[in-house]
Amino acid sequence: MLQPELFRSAEFADLIKKILALPRTDGRLMVAVSGAPASGKSTLAEFIANSLSAAGRQARYVPMDGFHLDNRILDARGLRARKGAPETFDADGFVALMRRMKLGGDVVYPMFDRSRDLAVAGAGIIEESTDIAVVEGNYVLQSEAPWSELADVWDLSVYLDVPEETLRQRCIQRWLDHDHTPEAARLRAEGNDMVNAKRVIENRLAADVTIRSDAVPAS
């Protein structure tokens, strides 16, 4: 659940103003929100979409997680333990759909069901009337191919810069919340989540807006 009091600073107000000031196009405006795992990307993206809607624009938050490869494919490739790494997503499919989404019209996209640990096809839709898509994901500003092909898709990009120790503690807490023991939670966080976090941090492209804060909670 969003906590609006966290977003009352001038920094967040200026971000919304920047997006509202973007020139309209024949298609759809695309706003990217990137950051490491547990940085608070989805919370920020949802806040942006809600704020734009409150300002009279038709905006929708679109998560990248629906493009996770199925566990059966990850098992066959020996990648289950690295789930969440760039190579465990259908990156080409994501890039193609973002290009289609930018053109406008109704666009159906998959969404990730955390309770079942799988992606569900056709679970989300962005309607033709929606003129701003706020797309959130670890790798939407990644310099590695094919993620790098997204650079010309975004009309504005945002990077949420959070200290690594904050990320580590949040990732550990996520696994504790999923009934892992403290040691198992630490191993999962440091053995995979923080490896992915470092990859995001070290291989990201420059963003139009960088927000340096550990106040935005991870969802």
Image (cartoon, helix red, strand yellow):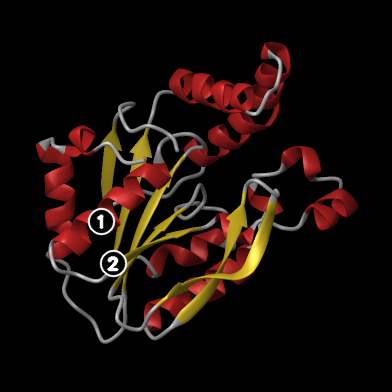
Quarter of the view holding residue 69: bottom right
How packed is label 1: few (under 14 Cα within 10 Å), some, or many (20 or more)?
Answer: some
Q: Is residue 144 above or below residue 38?
A: below
Say whether residue 154 is visible: yes
**What type is the residue that disc 2 sits on?**
Ala
Residue at the image position 66 percent from the left and 59 percent from the top = 119
Say whether residue 158 is visible: no
Residue at the image position 50 percent from the left and 66 percent from the top = 149
Q: Position of residue 123 (x, y in %)?
A: 56, 68
Can you tell which mark lies on residue 50?
A: 1
Q: Which residue is mark 2?
A: 59
Q: Nearer the viewer, residue 83 or 205?
A: 83
**What type is the residue that disc 1 sits on?**
Asn
Tell me the SS state at disc 2.
strand
Residue at the image position 15 percent from the left and 57 percent from the top = 18
- Name the quadrant of the N terminus: top left
Query: Is residue 192 rendered to the left or right of residue 200?
Result: right
